[in-house]
């Protein structure tokens, strides 16, 4: 087995393990339906019962709707501070009061400890534990109250500022390195961040499709409650823009019927009579390929299998399809083969240290092994570029959202109730969705080509 294949296998194994643990983490829900009586008995609530119940539900709905507190989102948990409670409308006078609230949440099984030794560095008043939330149980126990909460509260991550393009299109303008506390929409933030943003830059990023997106979004959302609406939120960090549509129902968990779980997504589909489903296979390479060539490849073409075959032909190294799929994003969004390779090696640093730990072996790695690894990596990188073009930006996620919106919007025009969770569609009547996806892809490409002459490249196929 070649050295590069060893590292790719290591990355694949780690990703599989992560997904497995993530799914176990998500399956916390045990079937417990919380009631007012359950909370009163187990929290426990001994005085001002109605007021305390209202506060408790407000806290739970706030946590469920934000999913993870913004500052620790990458750690998949909640770090409780006074501000956590303040955002939910609960004043905390001292650390003991906050401790009592958290202990009550734990007794009820609403939160659980992920890491008892988590250090966040926010001073003596903060707790150091990282907690997980039984989000599924909360939503299933109070679906109507939860939806009403979403409709009457604007729960957003807090950027430096937000620019409203329309009701359902917002732009976060922020600087990741800035550590200024925001107290209002127009105070204590860097005004230059707002001044440096303009709609023209957004239109350029979307290749002139933003007005079409807004029209379809408004028509699709008409008549839907807040939980079932789609919105799009762009994030602008200096000269970088990224954007993707999302919704509250996207947060529902995946089905796990084989293991005996009926998750929130299963119930959500039943409640909306969504008996049919379809997903766009390998959506990112398929859409990138469309942008690069003007050709929409149907689902019979397997991008990852093609990449594996090409790598075998070009270098004699066979990578299983799943390996290729696992490293595709790293190749696709690396700004150069060297940069993406350095990131790839860093993620595999443990295995590299284990194999080349002493000075003599490490010298051989630097002068001989690593350059050969990079040569093979460049071949992979070039194969992906040949298929998907030289644009390695995150714009593809916006165009993926555009295509997904087109499909559910068109199905609504045809009298079909349809939703999408990323590249998977759920709908209530049988229909040839593949034909609508192709129609939407060609429509989107034509809009892009009309806006940007660089896309007038003709129909060249790979």
Image (tube, grey):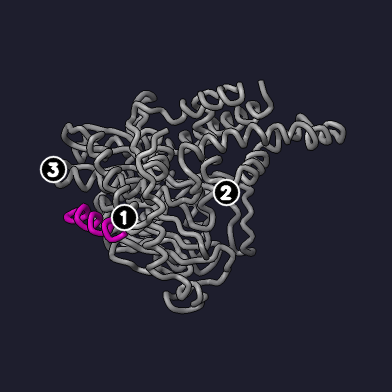
Residue holding disc 3: 414
Secondary structure of the residue carrying numbered label 3: loop
Q: Earlier in the sequence, mark 3 or mark 2?
A: 2
Secondary structure of the residue carrying numbered label 2: loop
Q: Is residue 397 left or right of residue 239?
A: left
Main secondary structure type of the part rendered in magenta: helix
Quarter of the figure with residue 211: bottom left
Q: Is residue 365 visible?
A: yes
Residue holding disc 2: 335
Q: Is residue 214 magenta?
A: yes
Nearer to the camera, 425 or 63: 425
The answer to the question of whether label 3 and label 2 lie on touching residues, with beta carbons closer than 8 A, is no
Secondary structure of the residue carrying numbered label 1: helix
Q: Is residue 319 magenta?
A: no
Q: Is residue 18 visible?
A: no
Task: Please report the bounds of the magenta region as a residue range.
Answer: 210-224
Q: Position of residue 283 (x, y in %)?
A: 39, 38
Residue holding disc 1: 450
Q: Is residue 1 left or right of residue 268?
A: right
Structural crowding at the residue carrying mark 3, measured as other residues with C-alpha within 10 Å and reported as few (<14), some (14–19) or many (≥20): few
Q: Position of residue 252 (x, y in %)?
A: 35, 42
Q: Is residue 436 above or below residue 59?
A: above
Q: For the view shown, which residue lies furthest in the bottom direction?
A: 187
Q: Determine the residue positioned at 21% across, 52% down.
A: 220
User: What is the C-alpha distance between the residues marked 3 and 1?
Assistant: 27 Å
Nearer to the camera, 20 or 238: 238
């Amino acid at each position: 087995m070649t050295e590069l294949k060893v590292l790719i296998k290591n990355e694949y194994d780690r990703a599989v393990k992560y997904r497995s643990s993530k799914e176990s983490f998500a399956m916390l829900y045990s079937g417990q339906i919380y009631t007012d009586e359950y909370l009163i008995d187990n929290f426990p609530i001994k005085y001002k019962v109605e007021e305390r119940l209202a506060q408790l539900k407000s806290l739970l709905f706030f946590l469920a709707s934000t999913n993870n507190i913004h500052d620790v989102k990458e750690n998949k948990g909640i770090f409780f501070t006074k501000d956590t409670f303040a955002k939910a409308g609960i004043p905390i006078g001292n650390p003991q009061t906050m401790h009592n609230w958290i202990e009550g949440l734990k007794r009820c099984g609403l939160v659980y400890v992920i890491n008892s030794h988590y250090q966040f560095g926010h001073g003596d008043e903060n707790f150091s534990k990282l907690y997980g939330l039984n989000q599924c149980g909360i939503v299933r126990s109070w679906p109507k109250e939860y939806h009403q909460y979403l409709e009457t509260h604007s729960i957003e991550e807090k950027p430096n500022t937000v620019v409203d393009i329309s009701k359902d299109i917002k732009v976060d303008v922020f600087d990741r390195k800035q550590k200024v506390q925001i107290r209002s929409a127009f105070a204590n933030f860097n005004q230059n961040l707002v001044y440096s943003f303009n709609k023209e830059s957004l239109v350029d990023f979307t290749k002139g499709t933003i007005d079409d997106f807004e029209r379809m979004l408004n028509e699709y959302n008409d008549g839907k409650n807040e939980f079932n609406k789609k919105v799009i939120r762009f994030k602008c960090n200096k000269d970088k823009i990224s954007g993707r549509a999302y919704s509250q129902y996207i947060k529902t968990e995946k089905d796990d019927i084989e293991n005996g779980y009926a998750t929130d997504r299963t119930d959500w589909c039943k409640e909306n009579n969504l008996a049919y489903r379809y997903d766009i296979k390998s959506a990112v390479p398929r859409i990138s390929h469309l942008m690069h060539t003007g050709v929409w490849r149907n689902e019979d073409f397997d991008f990852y299998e093609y990449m594996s075959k090409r790598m075998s032909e070009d270098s004699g190294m066979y990578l299983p399809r799943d390996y290729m799929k696992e490293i595709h994003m790293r190749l696709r969004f690396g700004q150069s083969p060297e940069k993406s390779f350095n990131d790839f090696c860093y993620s595999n640093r443990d295995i590299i240290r284990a194999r080349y730990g002493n000075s003599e072996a490490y010298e051989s790695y630097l002068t001989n092994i690593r350059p050969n690894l990079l040569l093979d990596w460049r071949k992979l990188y070039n194969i992906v570029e040949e298929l998907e073009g030289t644009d390695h930006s995150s714009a593809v996620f916006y165009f993926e959202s555009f295509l997904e919106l087109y499909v559910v919007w068109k199905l609504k025009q045809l009298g079909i109730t349809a939703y999408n969770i990323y590249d998977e569609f759920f709908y209530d009547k049988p229909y040839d969705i593949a034909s609508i996806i192709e129609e939407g892809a060609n429509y989107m490409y034509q809009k892009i080509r009309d806006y940007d002459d660089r896309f007038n490249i003709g129909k060249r196929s790979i």
